[in-house]
Amino acid sequence: MHHRTFGAATVAAVVGALLGISSACRPRRVPPPPPPLHIRLVAVGDILMHQDVKASAEHAPQGFPALWADLVPLFQGADLAFGNLETPVAPTTGRPGVPFQFNAPTTLPAALRTSGFTVLSTANNHAFDQGPGGVRETLDRLRSEQLVAVGSGEDRARAETLQIVERQGLKVAFLGFTDIFNIDLNRRATEPWVRPLDLEPALAAVREARSRADLVVVSVHWGNEYQHQPTKRQRDIARQLVAAGCDLLLGHHPHVLQPAELIEAGGRKALVAYSLGNFISNQDRMYRADHFPVAGGDSRDGAALQAVFEQRKDLDGQVHMVLAETSFEPLWTENNWGVPAAKREIRVIRVAAAEARTRAEVEALSVPETGPGAAARRAMLLEKQEYLRTLILRRKRVTETLGEAFVAR
């Protein structure tokens, strides 16, 4: 018998061939598909510039951002952050603000931008508080801070120009309308203009937006002040706007929250927030949970809407956006009105986080203690317990108003 010997090179070649066969037999690792394109939007209601709100900003070392510092991470973490700017910013062309006729200081636009706001509605009943010149100056100041203003313009054509913002490879169209004017100074198409909610032109504008963008957001200033329910007319208009192509409808003006609902119309589904309430204001400043019925604090309730839209493909290959996540986070405006000799402090807080902190503080203070500090500790415990009660009442009130299905737990 003869034994055949192989050189090292031959052995290596055979082993390599066998390994190649083995790897060829193994299934190839298919990389996971990329995540679908999506966009996160945060929206809040009325940004009101009452005198005490401005005074509170003047007293805060950080200025206006200190008034909503709790919300800054939320705004900055979103792709788009929206609010209703219910004031001109026209200190040069306008007069100092007075009750029911607002004007904001020059510092406000930069404060909103650094806080994370990107899109502001300027179509509301206070848009003309400082006259046509105030509209023009406001837009100049917002534009200088790269803030997108929707619903007003230096002339009618620019007020009606579709605003499209690109984020995450997606085009988001914003339109703004007001159903209410304190004073309507729309005179000539060549002068400053605030876009009214005229239904047929509004529907045509939404259809155009639908043809040009991946997502269509409509802001409407409407409804009855201090009423928690939208009118039949609002519901009818909302349905028509959805059928025309609206994906998200953001309502404001009542200064209190109203329900949210998903509307199906024209083969489409959209989220409608009839009123996001106040974001920041000096309203209901006298409210205390231990002295007033719960309704006495309604104008200090707010909500931060978080909506995630995701791009998906139908069975027939058509790509469209769907609402993948939605929640409303309860907000509360703290206000130290009535505290003797105190500087004005107005702050918007996130209720859930404040409630968790206060529960922990109450638990720590509830441990029995004797000695010289016992009385002060007891007084602090009672104060914290009352504050916790306020937060619980406000959270429940927001949940009942918006609808339990929508409020973040």
Image (spheres, rainbow, N blue to C red):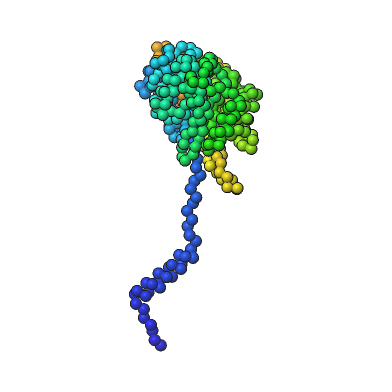
Residue 406 point in image, percent of width and height: 57, 32
Picture layout, residue 114 above or below residue 32: above
Using the rendered image of the protein, determine whether residue 94 is visible from the camera's viewpoint: yes
Residue at 63%, 30% in the rendered image: 239
Closest to the observer: 239 or 379? 239
Tag count: 0
Q: Is residue 56 left or right of residue 258?
A: left
- Taking the spot 35% from the left edge, 21% from the top edge, the residue there is 61
Residue 40 versus residue 334 in the image, above or below:
below
Which quadrant does the N terminus fall into?
Answer: bottom left
- Give x and y (percent) for residue 309: 53, 38
Residue 181: x %, y % from top left: 55, 17
Which residue lies most toward the bottom here? Answer: 1
Residue at 43 percent across and 70 percent down: it is: 18
Identity of the residue drawn at 50% across and 28% down:
161
Left or right of 283 on screen, residue 64: left
| 14, 362: nearer the viewer | 14
Residue 53: x, y in percent?
44, 18
Question: Do we see residue 336 in this rendering?
Answer: no
161 or 230: which is nearer to us? 161
Front in this rendered view, residue 155 or 60 = 155
Q: Quadrant of the C terminus?
A: top right
Residue 382 to residue 9: above or below: above
Image quadrant assignment for residue 337: top left
